[in-house]
Image (cartoon, coloured by chain):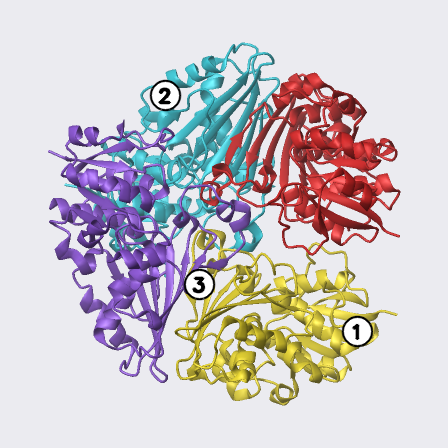
Chain colours: A purple, B yellow, C red, D cyan
Amino acid sequence: MNASVGILGHRGYSGAELAFLLSRHPGVTPVLLDHRDDDAPLRTSLRRIAYSPEAVLAEQFRVVFLATPPEISMDLTPALLDAGVVVIDLSGAFRLGTPDAYQRWYKTPHTQPALLAEAAYGLPEFCRSIIPGARLIANPGCYPTAANLAIRPLVEAGIVDLEAGIVCDAKSGVSGAGRKPSLAASFCEVTENFSAYSILHHRHVPEILRISGLEERHLSFTAQLLPIDRGILETIYFRSTKLKSAAGLLAIYRAQYANEPFIRIHDEGSVPDLRAVQRTNFCDIGVRFDPETGRAVVISAIDNLIKGAAGQAVQNMNLALGLPETAGLL
Amino acid sequence: MNASVGILGHRGYSGAELAFLLSRHPGVTPVLLDHRDDDAPLRTSLRRIAYSPEAVLAEQFRVVFLATPPEISMDLTPALLDAGVVVIDLSGAFRLGTPDAYQRWYKTPHTQPALLAEAAYGLPEFCRSIIPGARLIANPGCYPTAANLAIRPLVEAGIVDLEAGIVCDAKSGVSGAGRKPSLAASFCEVTENFSAYSILHHRHVPEILRISGLEERHLSFTAQLLPIDRGILETIYFRSTKLKSAAGLLAIYRAQYANEPFIRIHDEGSVPDLRAVQRTNFCDIGVRFDPETGRAVVISAIDNLIKGAAGQAVQNMNLALGLPETAGLL
Amino acid sequence: MNASVGILGHRGYSGAELAFLLSRHPGVTPVLLDHRDDDAPLRTSLRRIAYSPEAVLAEQFRVVFLATPPEISMDLTPALLDAGVVVIDLSGAFRLGTPDAYQRWYKTPHTQPALLAEAAYGLPEFCRSIIPGARLIANPGCYPTAANLAIRPLVEAGIVDLEAGIVCDAKSGVSGAGRKPSLAASFCEVTENFSAYSILHHRHVPEILRISGLEERHLSFTAQLLPIDRGILETIYFRSTKLKSAAGLLAIYRAQYANEPFIRIHDEGSVPDLRAVQRTNFCDIGVRFDPETGRAVVISAIDNLIKGAAGQAVQNMNLALGLPETAGLL
Amino acid sequence: MNASVGILGHRGYSGAELAFLLSRHPGVTPVLLDHRDDDAPLRTSLRRIAYSPEAVLAEQFRVVFLATPPEISMDLTPALLDAGVVVIDLSGAFRLGTPDAYQRWYKTPHTQPALLAEAAYGLPEFCRSIIPGARLIANPGCYPTAANLAIRPLVEAGIVDLEAGIVCDAKSGVSGAGRKPSLAASFCEVTENFSAYSILHHRHVPEILRISGLEERHLSFTAQLLPIDRGILETIYFRSTKLKSAAGLLAIYRAQYANEPFIRIHDEGSVPDLRAVQRTNFCDIGVRFDPETGRAVVISAIDNLIKGAAGQAVQNMNLALGLPETAGLL
C-alpha cells in the first residue's frame, strides 16, 4: 500500500513542482496541506485538506514536506515530529549546523536550536547513510547542491591550490526567487537583463563551506539572475599544480560518482548547458583544464526546482521510506 | 561641412548599429557601401552605393568603417589606405600585435603583417593619444573592452595577487555572434538556456592580455551565452593583500576615469546590471570587497554592439577627425 | 526660455519613459514631482521636488503630466487646473465622454464629471485642432491608439461591412500592465507563455468606439499578453464588398496620413513587426486583402510606452505649447 | 513483445520530440533511421541505424514515422508501403485530398497522387475510425489541429453566422518553423518581437477547410510568431444569432468531446493559456460570449510539437497498432 505524504506550501514554485513529481510517483499518495486561507492549489487534482496537527495524525502521514519560508518551517516542525512523521524541509531553516551560523547568515535567531543539531543534511551523494532513520531532513539549497557536487570531490582529492582560492560564479533562473511577486522578479525588469546579487555574501555560502570542506576565505561566490524560468549553472574556477590533464580531473568525478544515478559527467571537450538538465533530477558536470598553467574550469548544471529542491526532496523521501532512490524521478 | 564616411558590412548587427548611430551624428554624412549583391540595407534610409576603390575616391571619404569578417577586412584595407582614408576596422584582423599571435588565435595566417604592426588599438580610455594620426584603427573586441576597462587599472595599481590569478567570467547577448544564421544562435536553442563556450581559449583573450598587462597564466576567461539580444556583463574575481577596503578599490577607478565621458563608477554597495548600459556607449563598473579575506569582485557592463563595437568605432572616428569625442554618442 | 513641466508618477513605466523623453526634449525643462514618500526616481538625474499645489505655483509649470492611476488623476486635476497649468493625464480618468460610461467600464463613479466633459481626447491625428487651448488633455490608451489609427479611416471611408463586424486581436508587452508587482506580470508566469484577458470586455473598448465611430456590436476586441517588455501589435480583420484591392486599402491610409509625421504605411506585400516601432513614436500600418472574397487584414503596431503613452503625451504637450509637433520625438 | 517502429528525420524538432515520446512508450521499441550522413542523434540513447529499404525489412518495423520535408516524404513512402509498414507522415505531403490542392498551396506538383487519395487524415477526434487499417496516415498540421478541434463542432452545430465569417488569429512558438537555421528564427530577430506571416494564405488553410467544413471565403486565418519555444494559441472569432449563452457554447464542446482523453474544456469565465498545454498532448478550449450582440470568442491551445505533431503521431500509432490510445502520452 502506498505511503501517505503531505505537502505544505504547495503554491510556491518548489512546492508545486513537488506536488507534480509526487502525483506521478508510484510509491506514495500525496495530499496537499493548506496552511493559509489563500492556499488555492495550482493546476493539480491532488486531494487537499486544511493543515492541523490533528489532520496530520488522522492522515497517518509517513512524510510531510515543508516548502515554506524558514520561519514557518521552524514553527511547524516540532508538532510534526511529535506526530511521528518524517519532516523534509525545503527551506534554509535546518541546513546550517549551529544557531550562530543561522543567526549570522539569516539575520534572525533560530527558534529550534535542538532540532538544528539533529537535522540530517539531505545531499544523498554525500550524506546517503544518515537519511534513513533521520526524523528531520534539511533539503539542500539550490546553489549549494550544484556547488558541492562539483567542489567536494576536488577538495577531497586535494588537487585545489586553496591559497589561490575557488571562484564559483553562479547563475540562476528566476523561479529560484519564489512565487511571491516582487519588482525584482517582474518580467519587465528581468527580460533582456542580467544582474548580480548577494556578491560574496549569499546565505547559501555556509552550506557550500559545510559540505565542501572549504573555508570561507577560500571561496568567492556570486549569485546572478538569468532571464529564464528555471536552471542553475555554476562556473567554477580553480588552480592546480597537482593536476596533469583534463582526463585526470574527469577521473576524479567518474570515480566519485560511478554509482550515482543522478550525476552525469561529460566527456572531455564537452560541457553541460541548462537545456540538458531542465525538468530532470540530474546534475551534469563538465571540465576544461589547461595543463601548461594549471588553470581549471568546472561547469555544474541542475534544475533549481528539481535537483535543487523538489526532486532532491523526493530522492530523500525515497531513501527515508526505503523505496528505490530513483522512484518517480526518471 | 560634414565629413563623408563609408560603412562596409552594414547588414551585420554591428554594421547596422553603426549606420544607426552615424545617421544621427551631427558631424558626418554616412554612406552605405555594398560589398556583395545581397547587401540590401536594414531599416535605414541612408544613401547606399556599390563599393569599389573608385567609388571610395569619388566620395572623398575621410573614414571607412569595416564591419566585415577579418579575412575581408584584411583584403580591403590596403586599397582603402591607398585611397587616403582612415580605416576603422571592427573585426579582429588588426587587434593583435604580431602575425604569430594572429595565427595562433585565429588559426589562419595574417595576410597583411605590415599593417598589423601599424594598426592603432582603439580603446580610447587607454590609447587616446595614438588615434589621431593613425591610418588604421583596430576597434577593440566586445569582451576585451569590458575586461580591459575593469582590469588594467587594477594591474597598473599593483593591487592584484597575480599568483592567485584573475578570473573573468563573461556573459554576452546573442548579437555578439553576428547576424549570420546558425543553430547555436537559433531562438529555440537559446531561449531558456545558458551555456559556456571557448572556455579558457576564446580568441579575445590575447586582446585582454595585450592591454591589461596580464600574462596568460594569470587570467582565466570564459565566454557564455545569455538568452538576451545585447549586452555584456563580466564578473571579475581577484585577491588582494594590499587593498584595505571597497572604497580603496573604487578610488583607483575614480582616479583613472575621472575625466572619461563613457565610464561610470557605481557607489559602494551597488553594481551595474545590463539594463543601464543597453543602447548606450557607457561602461559601468561596480565592486565588492571583503577586507577580512582580501577577496574582490568587480562587475563591468557594456552594450556589446555600442561600447563593444559600433559606439566605440564612432568614438574613435571622433578622435580621428578632431570632433568632440562624445559627438553622436550621448 | 524653456517651459517648465512637471511629472507626477515618474516611477511607473509610462512616467519613467516620459521623464526620459522630456530629459532630451529641446524645448522644455522637466521636474519630477514626488507624490508619495517612496517616489525614489529611476535612473534619471532630473531635478525632483515634493508635489504640492504651492510647489506647482512656485515652479511656474506650463504643463503637468499625470502618470498616475485614474483615481489619483481625478483627485489632483482640479487643483492643478486652478493653478493655471495644462494637465496631460495618461490615465483613463478623462478619456470617456460621460460619467455613465466611466462607471460602466471602470466600475467606480467618476468624481469629476464636469472635467470629464471638458477634457480633450489627445489623439493628435484626429483631434489635433482641439489640443491647443485645452486645459485638460486625456492622453489616449495604448490599445485604442493602435486601433483607432487603423480603424477610423476605414469606417470614415465606408468600406467596412459593419454587419460582419470588425475583429481587433490585440497583443501587448508586459509593461502595459504597469510597474506594480503582480503574479500575472512575474517573469516565471509570463516567459514562454501567452494568454488572453478581458476578452470582449476590456476597458479600452469604449475609447475605440468613441473615436472610430463603431458601435459596440460591431467590434470584437481581445487583449493578450506577449512575453516581451514593450510593444502592441493589433491584427484587425474585416470584410468589404466595396474594396477592390490592397492598393485601394492602402490608398485610404495614404490619403489620411499623408502629412502625419508619426504614421508610416507599409507598401503592399509588407506588414509591420514590433521591432520597427519599439522605442519610437511611430504607428506602423500594413495590410493584406483578398479581392476574390473581400477578406481584409490590417496590422497596426506601436510602442505601448511611447505612441501608446509617453510619446503621445509629449506630442500633445508640443501642440499645447505651440512647439513643433515632433520636438523631442524623432 | 513490443512492436518495432522507425523514425526518419529524428534531428528536427518534431522528430526529436517523437523520439523522446517513443523512448518512454511502454508498447513499442523505437529505432532512429539515419537518412543523411549528418543525422547525428540529439540527446538520446536510442538505437540508430542507417536507413535503407533492406534495413526496414530486416527490422520488421510495424510503423515508420516520417518527420521529413514533404518532398522527402513523397520519395520514401512508396518503398515503405511496399515493405508492409504503416507510414505516419508528419509533413504536409499527404494532408490535402487532391494533387490540385497540393499544387496550389505547396507550389509544386505532387509526385504520388495515388497515395494522396489513399492517405487517412490523422485527427483522431474526428477521423478515428479510419486510422486502424490505413497504410498511410497523414499526421495533421499544428495550426489545423488547434483550429479544427475548435471550429468543426461549431460548424456542425450550425451556430456560426457564416456570412460574417470566422477569424482565426493564430500564434505559434518558433519551434514550429523547424530546426534548420534561418534569420527569421534567429534569437536576435525573434526576442522581444512579434510578427505576422502568410496572412490569409498560409498552407495550413486548406487543412482547416477540409476538416472544419468551412469554405475559403468564410475563414480569415493569420499565422504569427511568438517569442517562445513551443505552443500554439488560436483566438477564434465568430458571430451567432442562434447561440444564447456561453453555457450553450460550452455544451456543444462538452457533448462533442465527452469521451476524448486529450481535449479539456474550460469552465465559463476561464480560458486556456499556453503554459497548461506545453509538454502535453492536450488541446485546451475556452470560450467567451456576449449574448446581447452574438459575438463569440473561442481560444484553443496546444503544444505544437506534441498534439500539433509528435504526440498526435503517437496517438495515431496507438490506434494503428491497437494499443490504448493514450499509451505513452499521459
Picture quarter containing residue C121?
top right
Alpha carbons under labels 1 and 3: distance apart: 41 Å
Viewer-proximal residue among A138 and C199: A138
Contact between marks 2 and 3 (CB within 8 A): the answer is no
In 3D space, how far apart are the residues under numbered discs 2 and 1 (Cα atoms)?
72 Å
| SS state under label 2 | loop
Dot 1 falls on a residue whose secondary structure is loop
Mark nearest the camera among 1 and 3 is 3
Are there few (<14), some (14-19), or many (20+) residues within 10 Å of tag 1? some
Q: Residues within 10 Å of mark 3 (few under 14, many from 20)?
A: many
Quarter of the image that includes the N terminus of chain A? top left
Q: Is residue C264 left or right of residue B250?
A: right
Disc 3 residue type (three-letter): Ile
| Residue annotated with mark 1 | B323
Q: Is residue A93 left or right of residue A28?
A: right
- Give the residue at mark 3: A199
Image depth: mark 2 or mark 3 in front: 3
Mark 2 = which residue? Answer: D257
For the question of whether residue C115 can be seen, the reply is yes
Specify whether disc 2 shares its chain with disc 1: no
Residue at mark 2: chain: D
Location of residue B293 with respect to D87 vertically, above or below: below
